[in-house]
Image (cartoon, coloured by chain):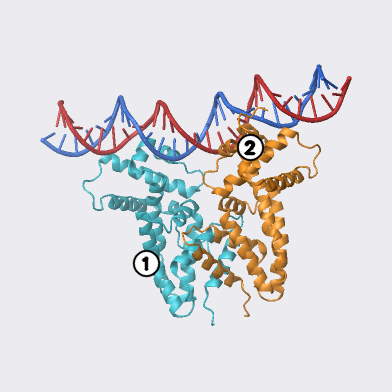
Chain colours: A cyan, B orange, C red, D blue
Amino acid sequence: MTTSNPTQLATDTIPVSDQALLVSDDAALEGDETARPMRADARRNYDKVVAAAREAFAEGGAETSLEGIARRAGVGIGTLYRHFPNRQALLEVVYRDEVKQVCRSAEELQGLPAWEGFVAWINRLAGYLVTKQALAHELLDYFGHDSDVFKTCRHDLFEAGEPLLARAQEQRAVRADTNLAEVIQLVGGITKIQTTDPAQRERILSIALDGLKYRAQ
Amino acid sequence: MTTSNPTQLATDTIPVSDQALLVSDDAALEGDETARPMRADARRNYDKVVAAAREAFAEGGAETSLEGIARRAGVGIGTLYRHFPNRQALLEVVYRDEVKQVCRSAEELQGLPAWEGFVAWINRLAGYLVTKQALAHELLDYFGHDSDVFKTCRHDLFEAGEPLLARAQEQRAVRADTNLAEVIQLVGGITKIQTTDPAQRERILSIALDGLKYRAQ
DNA sequence: GACAAAACGGAGGGTGCCTCCGCTATAGTT
DNA sequence: AACTATAGCGGAGGCACCCTCCGTTTTGTC
């Protein structure tokens, strides 16, 4: 139910054409409002690094050294650092897109009944967080922080989840004395659980969801 | 003695009484069932390292390099590794005691009503896990693994928590379809939440506890 | 094609993990 | 008390990582 979602969120399953899309997203990010466009070689390398990082993080966050990413991208370590002053910066750019995808997937859940829609989204979020442990952990760790990109992520997440949660609360499907920030933190904490048995994590998540259910009195 | 530092370098911040306790605890651990006692210098250094590690981890897990601990203990890095083949081994020995204390505290909760007793223990466990983030995270990460000392910890934790949980389940205070392993994982996940506002974590924990409550259905 | 500026990339400094091995302190033996 | 086998010590050094600095190369413009 939880992890093996119909909606595929892992990047490595995204067709190449879409990856190009992602790259142009990065371009948008770059040329957002600052002065002049990147030089051709710079843009090329920037994209190569982001792609390599995306791959590397997807494979499993553990052995994700920046030097490894640079090597994988066929780029000098200096170049990587020129574009991303630190590990954090790179992480941010990478999961910016990934978070967006989870958020986008929320729209199609508005058709479901309030509780079901809410639970479905939570499960998607959890599924995403679990598969992207490396990214997710850092995302959650900085959830309350002030980094620009994190603000964006949080904003996206709220925009997507808030309607689902609000509706569920209005219809007395979810308890009133909580909010999306808490819910996301709760889900995030649970996805951090290390276990050899994914089913266990799912059971635990469902216990937590029970705690979110509205209770008369 | 080959140590270049004065012996009291690392340990002088711990009250003497506690040191004695720690040492004798370690002694018990060591002489458990194996053959011959440690040589005097070995035992001395072993204790120094454990004390230094305890301090270092308590101060905040971040800057907890083994080399730093060795330095702090006034001991060569080689000596540290002689006693603790890797980071894991050292962590294990250190929080072995700490876990024991949480466990011991469970006994006095048997007097409370089932649900209250259970919740109280969970809160203590959570409190412990939060203050000892560094240790706790690793403890939880390896919770399902096979390391000897982890087995001991788990055993202690179960011995302490199981009666409380069982009683609460018998009295229909806690849902029947869960077990202590899941509960501990759940609590562990929540304590991993990074937040500037501890009250938020408490609210989230209470939501999760609500999920554990028995529900007539 | 020439030139300035932007970007590259890798050497290298700092730190951490862990291993190896020559030297030292210890504890039985005499 | 002296002797000796050896458990134990400690740090040099190999490897990996993070990140910076700067000489060299690539671009874009004229």
The residue to which callout 2 is attached is B8
Observer able to see residue B55: yes
Callout 1 secondary element: helix
B36 or B158: nearer the eye?
Answer: B36
| Vertical relation: B208 (above or below) A62 | below
* Rendered location of residue A153, percent (x, y): 38, 59
B18 or A158: nearer the eye?
Answer: B18
* Identity of the residue drawn at 23% across and 46% down: A37
| Vertical relation: B197 (above or below) A22 | below
Left or right of A5, for residue A74: left
Observer able to see residue A5: no
Q: Chain of mark 1?
A: A
* Identity of the residue drawn at 52% across and 60% down: A189
Callout 2 secondary element: helix
Q: Which circle marks residue A159 in the picture?
A: 1
Residue B179 found in image quarter: bottom right
| Vertical relation: B112 (above or below) A18 | below
Crowd class of label 1 (few under 14; some 14 to 19; many from 20; radius 10 Å) = some
* Rendered location of residue B57, percent (x, y): 58, 47
**Residue at the extreme bottom of the image, as rendered:** A217
Amino acid residing under circle 1: Glu
Left or right of A19, for residue D17: right
* Rendered location of residue C13, percent (x, y): 43, 29
Q: What is the quadrant of the N terminus of chain B in the image?
A: top right
* Identity of the residue drawn at 70% across and 37% down: B44
